[in-house]
Image: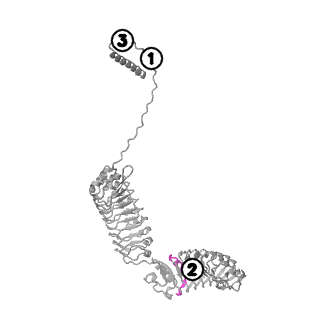
């Protein structure tokens, strides 16, 4: 039926109903029926589209974490906890003691340490999938660690140490990809360490000490590249220390003491340059301490006693200030082979005195040798000792901690080795009164700490290297009594710290450089007995601290700056003082 016909029918029906109602409400006579006019056709109205509402997604219900908390309360004798404020009440769970929740009421943290919990850890905790930290340490928990804890994908901290938990460590804990700190220490856990723990790539600290664990340390631990602390001490672990530990470059503390580990200490541990604590005591380790462990220069606590180690400990370890246990092992003397080579190169068998050289006495007991607290050679003091031959530069360059070299008044010959320029810590180099020849190595000017350079009374020739003006700390420069020629380098005027300058008794030529007037700290200036010409620069009058001035034995002319009239010791070569 069309919409128009439905409208007409509706009008007719309304009319009939109205008439019927009227007939019932009147008692007299029935009125004559009025003819119903024929309905006029009504235009069909345009249909209007009815919009269908967009269906809305049904909200996902937020999981309720209460059942897991209730299970924890019941399993750990919650009625006898030290504090159980609001537990099992209608208060929001974030108000329950030790519970932290997010804005949606999901549990993100449980802090119930030292709270008198006893009984087992319920597996229902594995449903708290928003949990970030679980701290149940220092209680009376017993039984096994539930494998369901491996479902806590957001967990970053798991602390259940200092309880009475037993059984094995669940391998499922290796699923906790976000875990940073895992502490299971001081329980009665047993069995092997699961290799799956090596999958915890974000782990910073792994503590499993004080249990009854056995078997070997998994080599997969070498995958824990972010690990800073590993403590597996006080167990029954056996086998060897994994070489894969060389990958733990962030490791700062390694404690494997009080186990049954055997074999040798792997040299690969020398790569752990951030290590400050190394405890390997009371195991069954054998062999020598690898020299590579000498790379661990940051160690401040070391325990190796209670093993069967032999040989010597790296000398660098002598500087350790903290705990130090090595079962009486002597320190290796790293520099001993170098000193032996020096002895042989300078005819040590004919020295005037060579007390303890080539012996097993500590290097610091060898005649003229000085060492630091690590046993590294810092000084050679052998004057007037009949050393002869050439100075073995390639040998001395292997003593990187050298500070003082005093080999004056001997019979050394040949050239001064340029390799001495690599000894960056060198403070004094005194080689005067020998038979050295050749030129002065320009490399000596690159020594940043050089304070005293005395090369006088040899047979050195050539010019004075301008590079000597680059030695910023130089206090004394004595090159007198040689066969040096050429001019005095103006770069020597850069030596702001210079106090004494001895250039006399050479064959130097040219004029005195005015730049020497910049040496405001100079007290002694010896330029005598050369072939210098020209006038004395007026700038030398700026040397107000000068006490000694010797310029005689040259071909100078003019006058000496009047401001130098107060010099206490002077050889002016007959030159008068300039008028004020």
Q: Residues within 10 Å of mark 2 (few under 14, many from 20)?
A: many
Discs 3/1, front: 3
Q: Residues within 10 Å of mark 3 (few under 14, many from 20)?
A: few
Image position of 292 with respect to 407: above or below = above
Discs 1/2, front: 1
Query: Viewed as shown, does residue 66 lie left or right of 46?
Result: left
Q: Position of residue 101 (x, y in %)?
A: 37, 52
Circle 3 residue = 31
Q: Earlier in the sequence, mark 2 or mark 3?
A: 3
Q: Earlier in the sequence, mark 3 or mark 1?
A: 3
Q: Quadrant of residue 479?
A: bottom right
The N terminus, quarter of image: top left
Query: Viewed as shown, does residue 512 lie left or right of 229?
Result: right
Query: Viewed as shown, does residue 471 lie left or right of 191?
Result: right
Residue 175 seen anywhere in this rendered image of the structure:
yes
Circle 2 residue = 452
Q: Callout 3: helix, strand or loop?
A: loop
The C terminus, quarter of image: bottom right
Residue sitting nearer the eye, 297 or 358: 297
Task: State the mark number for residue 241.
Answer: none
Q: Position of residue 208 (x, y in %)?
A: 34, 64
Residue sitting nearer the eye, 81 or 351: 81
**Residue range corresponding to the magenta coloring:** 384-401
Q: Position of residue 573 (x, y in %)?
A: 69, 86
Circle 1 residue = 40
Q: Position of residue 12 (x, y in %)?
A: 39, 18
């Amino acid at each position: 039926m069309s919409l128009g016909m439905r409208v007409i029918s509706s009008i007719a029906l309304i009319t009939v109903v109205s008439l019927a109602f009227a007939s019932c409400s009147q008692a007299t006579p029935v009125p004559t029926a009025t003819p119903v006019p024929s309905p006029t056709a009504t235009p069909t109205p345009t249909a209007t589209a009815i919009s269908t509402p967009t269906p809305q997604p049904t909200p996902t219900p937020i999981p309720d974490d209460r059942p897991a908390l209730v299970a924890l309360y019941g399993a750990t004798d919650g009625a006898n906890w030290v504090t159980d404020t609001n537990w099992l009440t209608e208060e929001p769970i974030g108000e329950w003691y030790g519970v932290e929740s997010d804005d949606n009421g999901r549990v993100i943290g449980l802090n119930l340490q030292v709270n008198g919990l006893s009984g087992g850890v319920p597996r229902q905790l594995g449903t708290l999938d928003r949990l970030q930290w679980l701290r149940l340490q220092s209680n009376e928990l017993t039984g096994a660690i539930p494998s369901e804890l491996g479902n806590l994908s957001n967990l970053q901290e798991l602390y259940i140490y200092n309880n009475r938990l037993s059984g094995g460590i669940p391998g499922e804990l290796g699923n906790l990809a976000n875990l940073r700190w895992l502490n299971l220490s001081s329980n009665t856990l047993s069995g092997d360490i699961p290799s799956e723990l090596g999958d915890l790539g974000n782990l910073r600290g792994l503590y499993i000490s004080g249990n009854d664990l056995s078997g070997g340390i998994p080599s997969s631990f070498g995958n824990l590249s972010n690990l800073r602390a590993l403590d597996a001490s006080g167990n029954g672990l056996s086998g060897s220390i994994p070489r894969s530990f060389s990958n733990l470059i962030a490791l700062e503390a390694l404690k494997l003491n009080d186990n049954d580990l055997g074999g040798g200490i792997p040299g690969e541990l020398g790569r752990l340059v951030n290590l400050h604590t190394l405890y390997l005591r009371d195991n069954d380790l054998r062999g020598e301490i690898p020299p590579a462990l000498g790379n661990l220069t940051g160690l401040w606590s070391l325990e190796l006693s209670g093993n069967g180690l032999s040989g010597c400990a790296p000398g660098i370890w002598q500087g350790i200030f903290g705990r130090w246990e090595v079962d009486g092992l002597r320190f290796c003397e790293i520099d001993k082979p170098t000193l032996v080579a020096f002895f042989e190169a300078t005819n040590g068998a004919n020295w005037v005195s060579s007390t303890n050289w080539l012996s097993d006495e500590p290097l610091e007991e060898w005649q003229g040798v000085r060492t630091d607290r690590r046993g590294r050679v810092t000084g050679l003091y052998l004057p007037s000792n009949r050393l002869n031959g050439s100075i073995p530069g390639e040998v001395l360059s292997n003593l990187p901690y050298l500070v003082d070299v005093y080999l004056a008044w001997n019979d050394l010959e040949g050239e001064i080795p340029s390799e001495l320029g690599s000894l960056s810590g060198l403070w004094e180099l005194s080689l005067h009164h020998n038979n050295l020849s050749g030129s002065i190595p320009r490399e000596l000017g690159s020594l940043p700490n050089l304070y005293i350079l005395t090369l006088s009374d040899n047979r050195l020739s050539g010019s004075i290297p301008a590079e000597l003006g680059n030695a910023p700390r130089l206090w004394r420069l004595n090159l007198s009594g040689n066969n040096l020629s050429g001019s005095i380098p103006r770069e020597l005027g850069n030596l702001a710290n210079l106090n004494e300058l001895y250039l006399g008794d050479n064959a130097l030529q040219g004029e005195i450089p005015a730049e020497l007037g910049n040496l405001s700290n100079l007290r002694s200036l010896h330029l005598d007995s050369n072939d210098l010409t020209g006038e004395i620069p007026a700038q030398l009058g700026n040397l107000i601290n000068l006490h000694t001035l010797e310029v005689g034995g040259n071909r100078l002319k003019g006058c000496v700056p009047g401001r130098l009239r107060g010099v206490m010791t002077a050889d002016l070569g007959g030159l008068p003082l300039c008028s004020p």
